[in-house]
Amino acid sequence: MKKLLALVLAMTMVMALVACGGNNDSQGSTPAQDQQQTEPNTPDTPEPAAGGGELTLWTYPIGDWGKEEKVKAITDAFTADTGIAVKVEYLAYADGDDKVNSAITAKSAPDLIMEGPERLVTNWGDKGYLVDLSDMFDDTDRGEINAAAMTACTHPNGSVYEYPLVVTAHCMAVNLDAFKEAGADQYLDLENHTWTTENFIKAVDALYAHFNAPVGAVFCKGQGGDQGTRALVNNLYGGTFATASHDQYTWDDPKNIQALEQLKSMPGIAFDASLEGGDEIKVFYQGILKMAFCWNIAQQLNPNQADTGAGLTASGEEIVFMGFPSESGKPALQGGIWGFGIFDNGDQAKIDNAKTFIKWMCDSEHTVDAVKTANYFAARSSAEGTDLSGIWADNEIMNQYQVLMPYLGDYYQVTKGWAGARTEWWTMLQKVGEGADIAETVATYAANANANAG
């Protein structure tokens, strides 16, 4: 199997699939460009309205918030409305954290930053570098914003270090044509895009019997796309990854051990240390694997990032997104949350302008445009009277994908020691794949994660 996968990977295009193949599972759908700045006073920039001031925004590649032409259009509109000019720098996940940390050390941090809670809340907010945004939320805001997002953006000390703009649900995908060929489509609830653990096991067995090769891979080369393997293991029998208070890792839960034992016993599932999430998608796209555990709306819209058709493999077979299998058929999906934080650079006028920017983008009539620029789903139901529920009514795939949003589960990426925990997780999967005792191995690596968190 590994030789075959290696051959396919050698022949396929080398292209980063950032939502699953990069260094952080909160990544958006498009790769970042090199550092660039949008100059606010170029000839094609509109004259600013009365007001004034200038802001710097650094953004990770969250959908089209990683594309200068898209961002310039919306920041120009903001400038025209408020008179506040915006300079933008585009970060890559490969070195973005280093650039931000260097800027903090040099006391030249940007005014605004766009990313997820694991950076804004657990990292820079926790260290005291960000402004508490609690005063931006009234009872109406808290009622309109997705509860999981609001919780994730709030530090245990009560401070809110991120104002959420968009959310999504990570999921898995299946090759529907292959399932039909093997008679395994009977195990899918295609209306709700869910299935049970029992039916997942039956489907894998049917696929393996038909194709005589592993049809799914627990990839564990590194952390890229590891949200998929975590969700697969946690959902199978209802295990958890961390405590609700996010102060300890719990993946030594007996239910997770049961899930790993089940997966390891299945000839249709390979534990493959030669693949990360992005690699798995490529092999799935080529038709070798019949299911992918690293998936989200970015892949569903364009699985190979080469414009050969949404929801199709390289040979034209239909790709269907699915929630992870669970005993009840109702999964708890890991989500992505992205929004804005404000660095406390000691300039109250800049902080006030940055709050104006956030309000304009996240809670106004302009929120529709800001959300659509991200290519994800609004983190709130309405914004100052603007109903956001039908924001993707004109896009069949995006509109259909919303069926998964009610299944968003705990955003445990804000648990302390997160970076180290991720390494312990995929290293543990490698050991399981090598045949180590599963209960002992899980206990060892979960303990390592908790030691790092302490």
Image: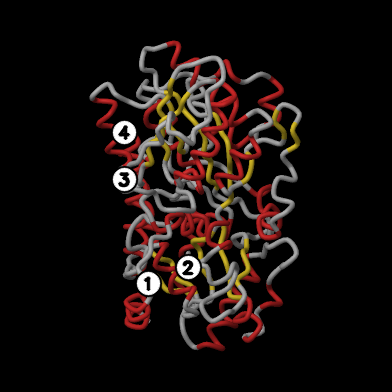
Residue of label 2: 306
Q: Is residue 394 left or right of residue 412?
A: right
- Marks 3 and 2, how far apart in space? 40 Å
Query: Residue 119 location in percent, x, y?
Result: 40, 35
In percent of the image, x 49 and y 53: which residue is there?
A: 29
Query: Residue 172 location in percent, x, y?
Result: 56, 63
The quadrant the C terminus occupies is top left
- Marks 2 and 1, how far apart in space? 10 Å
Residue of label 4: 100
Q: Is residue 376 in view?
A: yes
Question: Which corner quadrant of the image does residue 58 belong to?
Answer: top left
What crowding class fits label 4: few (fewer than 14 Cα within 10 Å), some (14-19), or many (20 or more)?
Answer: some
Q: Secondary structure at mark 4?
A: helix
Question: Foreground mark, 1 or 3?
Answer: 1
Of residues 223 and 19, the one drawn nearer to the viewer in this rendering = 19
| Numbered circle sitting on residue 13 | 1
- Marks 1,4: beta carbons within 8 A: no
In percent of the image, x 66 and y 39: which residue is there?
A: 368
